[in-house]
């Protein structure tokens, strides 16, 4: 394993050296994110007061915010189509966007996974995701722990795609409400039309200063690492892209230009859909009464309008899975041109306007940890170091 060293400050402010690990199998953060985003996409939330019982009356709430899982499970539209193409030559005739993200849009994870290696993204779409490692599972467990500090999951029965979206939008409403009143929230879904393509994501954590006059939300992402090592530059760049995508989406949402008609049309949603009693009840617990899905979307838009843009500084945290100690905290400025150009380049690949690229020469070490190396043309005639 290739290692170097870097000066870093731990949480107790002592300066010491933490080795930088170029990459480890379990730290293939983009895959972990891909897997967790699928899990998150089926989660919804609704607000409840402390001590109020939910439909699942045995659950005691420790927070004002509750996450609910849709009891109908993953919908067919949420399940990735897995193509049957095998072998080293890939034949992709239809655009990946149409073939795999029709009716659901791209996720931020799709963008970051593509940034890691577009050919690998293509393999994942065509052959399915690699098996999860123990460290990936440990990372998910840690994220669940962080989530439980501020929210509690319960299950809500939903009857339609409209209700699934209604609950997702409520996730945002309740999350931002918690942010404004408590200064902290986690697992906030974001959505927007980016360069003509619908994109979704889930922000790990948002903080807002409670006592200052200017209160722009700070977007934070925590990465867990199985070894007490710092990430490679490629991993940091990938994580920067992820956080910048979140800010891009957040800022678009609060700018009051959410294209509702396009939203209904693209996701094939009926604004006149009458919500079920269960869903109405959960929405009502936030103080708003919606009869139809369209009313819920209007409510969501009104909430968005009241929020400020996200802070220009974004924060990445790296935590050791072993004892949850902080390995590094890394703040960096938002660069709208940088993120836009990355997204535009990425969309050309997804739309089939250009072929998938391979990793660059100086990042060929990624191939050593790639589950698809055996079938990748990159490894055909090259010895990957
Ligand atoms: S082997 Fe390398 S180039 Fe090929 S898909 Fe994997 S990471 Fe990408």
Image (cartoon, grey):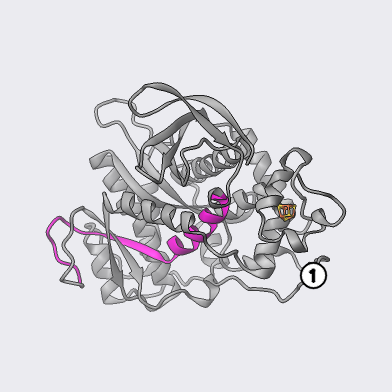
Nearest the camera: 162 or 33? 33
Residue under numbered circle 1: 87
Can residue 312 be seen by looking at this rendering? no
Above or below, 353 against 237 in this view is below
Provide residue 4's location: percent of width, then percent of height: 60, 30
Nearest the camera: 162 or 358? 358
Where does the magenta region start and end? 28-55
| 199 relative position to 82: left or right | left
Above or below, 378 against 238 in this view is below
What residue is drawn where x is 51% and y is 41%?
Answer: 243
Q: Residue furthest right?
A: 381
| 10 relative position to 373: left or right | left
Provide residue 91's location: percent of width, then percent of height: 81, 68
Q: Which quadrant of the structure image shows residue 363?
A: top right
Whether disc 1's CB lies below 8 Å from ligand 1 is answered no
**Position of the C terminus by quadrant:** top right
Residue 371 magenta-drawn? no
Provide residue 214's location: percent of width, then percent of height: 34, 26
What residue is drawn where x is 56% and y is 33%?
Answer: 20
Provide residue 255's location: percent of width, then percent of height: 47, 42
Nearest the camera: 341 or 315? 315
Q: Secondary structure at mark 1?
A: loop
Ligand 1 occupies quarter:
bottom right
């Amino acid at each position: 394993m290739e290692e170097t060293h870097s000066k870093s400050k731990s949480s107790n402010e002592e300066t010491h050296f933490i080795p930088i690990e170029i990459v480890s199998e379990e730290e293939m953060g983009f895959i972990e994110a891909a897997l967790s985003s699928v899990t998150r996409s089926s989660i919804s939330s609704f607000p409840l007061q402390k001590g109020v019982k939910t439909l699942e009356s045995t659950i005691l709430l420790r927070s004002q915010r509750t996450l609910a899982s849709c009891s109908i499970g993953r919908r067919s539209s949420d399940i990735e189509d897995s193509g049957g193409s095998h072998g080293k030559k890939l034949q992709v005739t239809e655009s990946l966007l149409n073939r795999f993200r029709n009716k659901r849009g791209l996720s931020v994870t799709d963008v970051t996974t593509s940034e890691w290696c577009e050919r690998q993204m293509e393999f994942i779409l065509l052959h399915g995701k690699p098996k999860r490692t123990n460290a990936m599972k440990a990372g998910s467990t840690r994220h669940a722990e962080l989530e439980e500090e501020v929210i509690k999951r319960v299950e809500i029965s939903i009857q339609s795609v409209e209700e699934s979206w209604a609950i997702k939008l409520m996730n945002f409403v309740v999350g931002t409400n918690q942010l404004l009143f408590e200064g902290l929230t986690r697992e906030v879904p974001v959505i927007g039309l980016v360069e003509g393509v619908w994109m979704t994501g889930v922000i790990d954590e948002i903080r807002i200063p409670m006592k200052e006059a200017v209160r722009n939300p700070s977007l934070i992402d925590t990465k867990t690492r199985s070894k007490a090592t710092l990430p490679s530059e490629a991993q940091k760049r990938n994580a920067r892209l992820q956080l910048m995508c979140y800010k891009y989406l957040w800022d678009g949402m609060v700018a009051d230009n959410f294209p509702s008609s396009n939203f209904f049309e693209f996701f094939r949603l009926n604004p006149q859909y009458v919500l079920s009693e269960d869903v109405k009840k959960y929405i009502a617990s936030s103080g708003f009464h919606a009869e139809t899905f369209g009313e819920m979307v209007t409510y969501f838009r009104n909430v968005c309008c009241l929020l400020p843009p996200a802070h220009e500084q974004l924060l990445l945290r790296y935590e050791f899975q072993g004892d949850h100690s902080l390995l590094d905290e890394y703040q960096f400025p938002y660069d709208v041109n940088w993120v836009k150009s990355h997204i535009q380049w990425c969309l050309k690949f997804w739309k089939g306007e250009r072929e998938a690229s391979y990793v660059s020469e100086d990042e060929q070490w990624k191939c050593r940890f790639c589950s698809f190396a055996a079938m990748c043309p990159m490894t055909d005639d090259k010895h990957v170091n």
